[in-house]
Image (cartoon, rainbow, N blue to C red):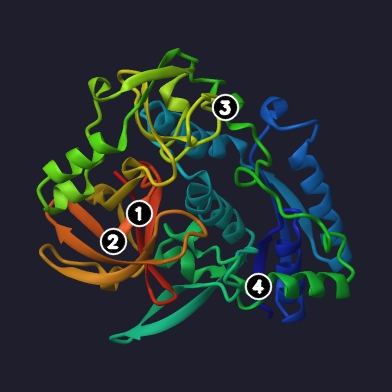
Amino acid sequence: MNKRVVVGLSGGVDSSVTAYLLKEQGYDVIGMFMKNWHDDSVTISNECPWLDDSNDAMIVAQQLGIPFQAIDLSKEYKERIVDYMFAEYQRGRTPNPDVLCNREIKFDVFLETALKLGADFVATGHYCRKGETNNNGQTIYQLLAGKDPNKDQSYFLCQLTQTQLSKALFPIGELLKSEVRAIAKQAGLTTADKKDSQGLCFVGKVHLPDFLQQRLEPKKGKVIELDAESIIFKKNQAENNLVNLTNPYKLQPSLGEVVGEHNGAHFYTIGQRRGLNIGGFEKPLFVIGTDTDLNVIYTGMGEGHPGLYRSGLFIPNSDEHWIREDLRMGIGTQKKYLARIRYRQPLESCVLFKEEKGLYIIFDRPQRGITPGQFAAWYDHDELVGSGVIN
């Protein structure tokens, strides 16, 4: 009897080709569309994205001659993703809903549903690969970068566990995007020329300020500009130890001057340039810090402002995650890895230091826009080994 696999059909070309390839390989394939969102009031333009995507997914299933069903996971999505997002923004942090969607929805609720249908695996259209290695007779699953350097999506799966990986298939991870589109055209799939989706995971294009204002009230506050000298002075004052190298700068209103007004510190994130609407400066202003308690935004002028850069970051024990549990570091140890702090950022050389309170990541060169709430992921060559939420 053929192995059964449930494919998360999103209505895009990547998941369509995923289903096509698996069917060609002899799997018993079922297509399933996840509906995660009901509220169209915050979507951009007049699109009804989930409905269009669901229809496209259904057409592809018909073209491939595979069973298809839609599953409504909007309740779980709201509880696990949306509520978490609001709570994080309220605290002045910037969450990554796509990483959470993979951990909490696709490879949890969706996976459980697939297993109830008798599936041996679930498959997604992610550009990443799954490998295996052996440790004392035990199979260890590896999450590897996709072959297409411009599309590698391993970062979005950085919170997966060994159990989740064991049940996952990523058929297009060995392909370039151009090859995926060519396969779709050759197979006559309706999604062959469909543009890639931009927006929240399985929700579509959402205007984030409108989305956040559903629950986070606008609140006028001060925008303060800090000159480079005040930041450099604070940097030099800090001792060269792990805590000071990774702590966000302790910014205070008295350090700079008020240059404008904003609608709520929780709507802004470090490194942001758009949305400030403050002119008259020689160079653009960038957000270098937010304080949701005082409702203050701190800005610096120009891309090279030292307030945009930090040498490292800290991940508390509760937010530390290892895909490769067999490589988990012991207290007092250190190891060289490559890491990134956002999707598509080039991997940067760093050293991980495991201390009693958590994990410190110190980069060989300072990183721009290290943002609390985002995920840092560390790699050994092309293998994603672990990840954690930046404090």
The answer to whether residue 165 is seen in the rendering is yes
The residue furthest front is 282
Q: Of callouts 3 and 1, which one flags the residue occurring earlier in the amino acid sequence?
A: 3
The Cα atoms of the two marked residues, 1 and 4, are separated by 31 Å
Residue type of the residue flagged with mark 3? Pro
The Cα atoms of the two marked residues, 2 and 3, are separated by 32 Å
Write down the residue under mark 3: 209
Q: What residue is rendered at 57% in x and 27% in y? A: 209
Q: What residue is rendered at 22% in x and 56% in y? A: 359
Q: Of callouts 2 and 3, which one flags the residue occurring earlier in the amino acid sequence?
A: 3
Q: Of callouts 1 and 4, which one flags the residue occurring earlier in the amino acid sequence?
A: 4
Write down the residue under mark 1: 367
Q: Of callouts 4 and 3, which one flags the residue occurring earlier in the amino acid sequence?
A: 4
* Badge 4 element: helix
* Position of residue 305 measured from the top left corner of the image (x, y, whole percent): 36, 42
Locate residue 141: give its quadrant.
Answer: bottom left
The Cα atoms of the two marked residues, 4 and 3, are separated by 34 Å
Residue type of the residue flagged with mark 1? Gln
Which of label 4 and label 3 is nearer to you?
A: 3
Residue 172 numbered mark, or none: 4
**Residue 26 to residue 352: above or below:** below
